[in-house]
């Protein structure tokens, strides 16, 4: 491409003057000016945002930043073909307006002479061309665009897997969910969660089943259509910001060597805390028959009452009551409460099964968690654990431990007839925390 410099042309009449050829660049000499070339309906944009009131210049476009307050732009004196453009710098015109004032006596869009125009629409941009004294400055182009570029959550922590456009962080022990990018509404800004606490221990010696750990889950709307449990919170997912979120995964209760079972430990993510499951009651002498209270109540030994679930209370409830021990005296204990069902009462013929847990596909695999442990007997058939909960022990045998990272309750310990020697209650299962979000 050649370059043609025009250093001096004084005049040209009666013929057409052609400068250069197609593809050439025409440069005016130093100090020279041009007239008569005209504009093509565009402006030269001033890319330094305006943050205070100012007077516009013909042929210029302005990015106006009203974050700190209202701004007034005064138009230049109108001349036919004069052009000015404005654009909301960062979508704040709806919070603090842009006021456009024409020069004294001039109009905007045929309005009142000297009448101002107030721009209060988020993301708005306008181009004005001065036509004549009848309409003054005429709006020839208008846009309104508020959608930002797509941006997704970026985070680390736990064991990370993918399911299509979604990432899943699974914590089976303590850790930190670290968010390095909080995303935006065009991409993702919230995470779905499942938080299950540790399960309670089964009671010793014809003991009741341990209660399942607290079960709390979001509705799944933020990260794809996966199947949630009936306990899913209809209020939805949690917003996240750039920070580290400590993760607590509650441990299951230790095996019970004598008396009532112990409670499991809480699991925590952000504002969500799931309480530990309660321990089952025991037929050992003393006021040990009733099950303890907890996220799901412990099953009771004869002749006690099952523990109360959803303790402390949350909505939706995080668990259910434990089953009662049989009052007729055959020493059959109730099952521990589960996430979605109460523990079954002991009967004259069998120990009570644990209450059902809850099933979620947040990790792309339907998995049942937080079931109650089974209730034991003194020589009769024992109750089975449900959804991670342990089965009760047969006479002379320890109750089964719950499955790790399910939050299941431990099985009640068996008894030896006629000596009723203590038999240990099973351990509760540890909890789990799962976080899921759209990442692309």
Image: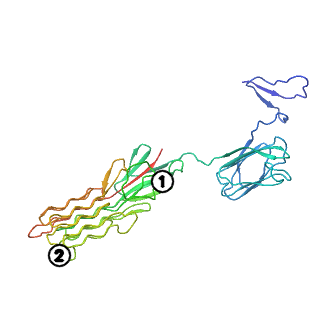
Which mark is first along the chain, 2 or 1? 1
The image's colour scheme reads: rainbow
Query: Please, which residue is most extreme toward the bottom here?
Result: 286
Residue 3 relative to residue 391: left or right: right
Left/right placement of residue 266 relative to residue 422 reads right
Q: Report if the CB atoms under discs 1 and 2 are less than 8 Å apart.
A: no
The vertical placement of 61 against 95, above or below, is above
Which residue in the protein does label 2 denote? Answer: 285
Q: Residues within 10 Å of mark 2 (few under 14, many from 20)?
A: few
Query: What x and y, as percent, mark residue 10?
Result: 90, 29
Residue that label 1 marks:
190
User: Could you say where residue 92 lies in the image, as x and y percent from the top left?
Assistant: 65, 54
Residue drawn at x 79%, y 37% as measured from the top left: 39
Residue 67 at x, y percent in the picture: 66, 56
Q: Which mark is residue 13?
A: none
User: How far, Cα to Cα, is label 1 from label 2?
Assistant: 52 Å
Q: Secondary structure at mark 1?
A: strand
Q: Residue at x 45, y 52 (%)?
A: 221
Image spot of residue 145 (x, y percent) = 63, 47
- In the picture, the quarter occupied by the N terminus is top right
Classify mark 2: helix, strand or loop: loop
Dividing the picture into quadrants, the one containing residue 162 is: top left
Report which quarter residue 385 is drawn in: bottom left
> Crowdedness of circle 1 by 10 Å Cα count: few (<14), some, many (20+)?
many
Residue 150 found in image quarter: top right
């Amino acid at each position: 491409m050649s370059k043609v410099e025009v250093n001096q042309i004084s005049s040209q009449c009666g013929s057409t003057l052609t400068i250069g050829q197609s593809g050439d660049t025409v440069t005016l000499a130093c100090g020279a000016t041009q007239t008569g070339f005209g504009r093509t309906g565009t402006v030269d944009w001033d890319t330094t945002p305006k943050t205070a009131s100012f007077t516009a210049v013909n042929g210029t476009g302005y990015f106006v930043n009203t974050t700190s307050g209202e701004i007034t732009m005064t138009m230049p004196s109108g001349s036919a073909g004069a052009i000015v453009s404005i654009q909301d710098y960062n979508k704040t015109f709806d919070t603090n307006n842009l006021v456009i004032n024409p020069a004294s006596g001039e109009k905007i869009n045929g309005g009142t002479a000297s009448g101002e125009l107030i721009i209060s629409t988020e993301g708005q941009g306008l181009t004005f061309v001065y036509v004549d004294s009848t309409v003054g400055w005429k709006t020839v182009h208008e846009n309104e665009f508020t959608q930002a570029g797509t941006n997704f959550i970026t985070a680390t922590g736990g064991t990370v897997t993918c399911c299509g456009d979604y990432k899943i962080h699974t914590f089976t022990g303590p850790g930190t969910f670290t968010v390095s990018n909080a995303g935006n509404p065009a991409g993702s800004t919230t995470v779905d969660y499942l938080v299950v606490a540790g399960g309670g221990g089964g009671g010793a010696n014809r003991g009741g089943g341990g209660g399942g750990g607290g079960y709390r889950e979001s509705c799944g709307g933020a990260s794809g259509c996966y199947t949630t449990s009936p306990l899913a919170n209809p209020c939805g997912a949690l917003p996240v910001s750039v920070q580290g979120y400590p993760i607590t995964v509650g441990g299951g209760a230790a095996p019970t060597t004598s008396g009532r079972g112990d409670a499991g430990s809480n699991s925590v993510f952000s504002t969500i805390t799931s309480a530990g499951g309660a321990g089952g009651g025991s037929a050992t002498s003393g006021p040990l028959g009733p099950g303890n209270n907890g996220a799901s109540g412990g099953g009771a030994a004869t002749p006690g009452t099952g523990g109360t679930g959803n303790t402390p209370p949350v909505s939706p409830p995080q668990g259910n009551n434990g089953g009662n021990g049989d009052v007729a005296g055959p020493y059959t204990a109730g099952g521990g409460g589960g996430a979605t069902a109460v523990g079954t009462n002991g009967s004259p013929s069998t120990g009570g099964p644990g209450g059902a847990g809850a099933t979620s596909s947040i990790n792309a695999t339907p998995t049942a968690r937080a079931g109650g442990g089974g209730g034991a007997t003194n020589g009769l058939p024992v109750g089975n654990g449900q959804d991670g909960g342990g089965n009760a022990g047969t006479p002379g045998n320890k109750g089964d431990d719950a499955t790790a990272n399910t939050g299941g309750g431990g099985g009640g310990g068996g008894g030896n007839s006629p000596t009723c020697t203590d038999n240990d209650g099973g351990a509760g299962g540890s909890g789990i925390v799962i976080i899921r979000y759209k990442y692309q």
